[in-house]
Image: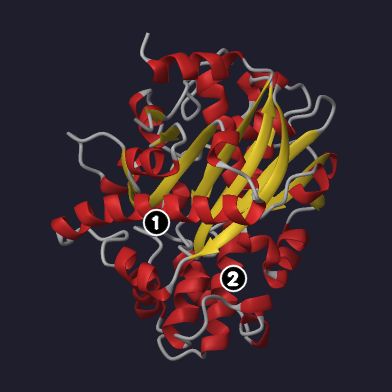
């Protein structure tokens, strides 16, 4: 037996595994590195977050990624170079974290790397009949495995698409395994660049679990903050938006896109929700000259209303008073967005921190859980509904 396969076999039989989960989202602020200790699998998964760090991307790294990010026309050589470069960069960030935590590579069983998304193209967006759903994350897993000397799982979203999904949201699997609770209806609302939520029913019946993107989370707020204030990465504490007034006509046009009338579940990305998307809406609504404050207030309200409307749709006739909503992602730090959500959704609001997992670390932790499931689980059945194929995900890269 190949020694790498033998090691993988031994890892699968261990009582617990130390797995590093990596996540870099569409906000491109940096790489989330979460060292987890995981026992069990499937519905018996238990996870302890041992260490967490966000390794910031430099301005130079962000600039290089933005040359290809969510663009239909790019320098193909640059994309090829970035694939290797990002893999090496992420490997260096892992080693830096391990050194800081005084942990050796030999003490880590697996790395679970999401990679850096540069294009998300579900059929609902590309609308080309002959082509399937598609997505692309760069940061080659072989480079991570060789440089860190740790078995690496990467490129998780491709199996999801191959099995009939759209490659997102993948949070549903980890959400169900570690956050589901019998007797409590939970909604796990993650507000990254794009917002998505997982509905976890009190019955804990996996066939009743529901997940979808809702539309923009922070991506438009961040994009226009950078557009008008290049020195700022985002509207900290909604200080700009709080000084503005929501423009009702612009909001109406922003919400008129076909995406919001397409059936659930569905996925999307900055490929749709871009600066051009907003500028086109401003032309139609004749709001090109509104203040920056009013624009950011309107974009924040746009996120709040589309999230709220999706959750109301998913819950149907059930009373939201019987639901607990757990927030994660950068949007949970936006006080105006959270305030409006609480006004629009009469549920009980918490953070995933209240369940023992930092809302900032949650997505990285969830990819560690996906890797654990591929190596030691893979027996859960989510039924045959669209959007949640019952599959194990991640390509395996050996260090040698």
Viewer-side residue, 272 vs 64: 64
Q: Are marks 2 and 1 in contact (CB under 8 Å)?
A: no
- Residue 197 can be seen, yes or no: no
Q: Quadrant of the N terminus?
A: top left
Q: Position of residue 261 (x, y in %)?
A: 45, 48
Q: Position of residue 50 (x, y in %)?
A: 71, 43
Query: Residue at the location (66% across, 48% down)?
Result: 189
Q: Going from the N terminus, do you reach mark 2 or mark 1 first?
A: 1
Spatial CA span between label 2 and label 1: 33 Å
Query: Residue at the location (39% across, 59% down)?
Result: 270
Query: Residue at the location (31% across, 37% down)?
Result: 133
Marking on residue 134: none
Q: Secondary structure at mark 1?
A: helix
Q: Position of residue 74 (x, y in %)?
A: 18, 61
Residue 27 is left or right of residue 207, and the answer is left
User: Of the residues tagged 2 and 1, which is closer to the observer?
Assistant: 1
Disc 1 target residue: 89
The vertical placement of 292 against 305, above or below, is below
The vertical placement of 298 against 309, above or below, is below
Residue 266 is left or right of residue 100, and the answer is left
How many residues crowd around disc 1 within 10 Å: few (fewer than 14), some, or many (20 or more)? some
Q: Quadrant of the C terminus?
A: top left
Query: Residue at the location (56% across, 23% down)?
Result: 373
Q: How is the image coloured?
A: secondary structure
Disc 2 target residue: 300
């Amino acid at each position: 037996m190949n020694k790498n396969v033998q090691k993988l076999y031994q890892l699968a039989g261990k009582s617990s595994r130390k797995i590093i989960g990596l996540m870099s989202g569409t906000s491109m602020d940096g790489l989330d590195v979460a060292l987890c200790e995981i026992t069990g699998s499937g519905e018996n998964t238990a996870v302890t977050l041992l260490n967490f760090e966000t390794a910031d991307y430099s301005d130079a790294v962000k600039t290089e990624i933005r040359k290809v990010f969510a663009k239909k026309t790019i320098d193909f050589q640059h994309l090829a170079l970035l694939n290797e470069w990002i893999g090496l960069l992420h490997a260096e960030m892992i080693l830096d974290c391990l050194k800081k935590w005084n942990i050796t590579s030999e003490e880590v069983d697996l790395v679970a790397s999401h990679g850096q998304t540069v294009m998300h193209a579900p059929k609902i967006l590309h609308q080309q009949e002959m082509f399937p759903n598609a997505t692309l994350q760069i940061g080659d897993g072989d480079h991570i495995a060789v440089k860190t000397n740790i078995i690496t799982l990467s490129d998780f979203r491709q199996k999801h698409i191959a099995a009939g999904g759209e490659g997102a949201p993948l949070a549903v699997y980890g959400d169900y395994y570690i956050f589901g609770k019998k007797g409590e209806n939970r909604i796990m609302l993650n507000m990254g660049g794009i917002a998505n939520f997982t509905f976890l029913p009190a019955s804990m019946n996996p066939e009743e679990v529901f997940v979808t993107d809702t539309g923009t989370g922070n991506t438009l707020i961040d994009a226009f903050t950078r557009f008008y204030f290049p020195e700022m990465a985002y509207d900290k504490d909604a200080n700009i938006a709080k000084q503005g007034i929501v423009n009702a006509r612009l909001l109406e046009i922003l919400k008129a896109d076909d995406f919001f009338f397409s059936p659930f579940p569905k996925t999307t990305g900055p490929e749709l929700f871009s600066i051009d998307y907003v500028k086109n809406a401003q032309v139609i609504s004749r709001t090109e000259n509104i203040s920056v404050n009013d624009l950011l207030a309107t974009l924040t309200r746009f996120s709040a209303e589309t999230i709220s409307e999706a959750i109301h749709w998913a819950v149907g006739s059930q009373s939201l008073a019987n639901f607990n909503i757990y927030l994660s992602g950068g949007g949970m730090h936006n006080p105006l967005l959270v305030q409006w959500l609480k006004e629009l959704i009469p549920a009980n609001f918490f953070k995933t921190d209240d369940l023992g997992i930092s809302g900032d670390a949650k997505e990285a932790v969830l990819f560690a859980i996906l890797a654990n499931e591929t190596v030691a689980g893979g027996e859960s059945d989510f039924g045959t509904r669209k959007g949640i194929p019952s599959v194990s995900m991640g390509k395996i890269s050996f260090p040698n």
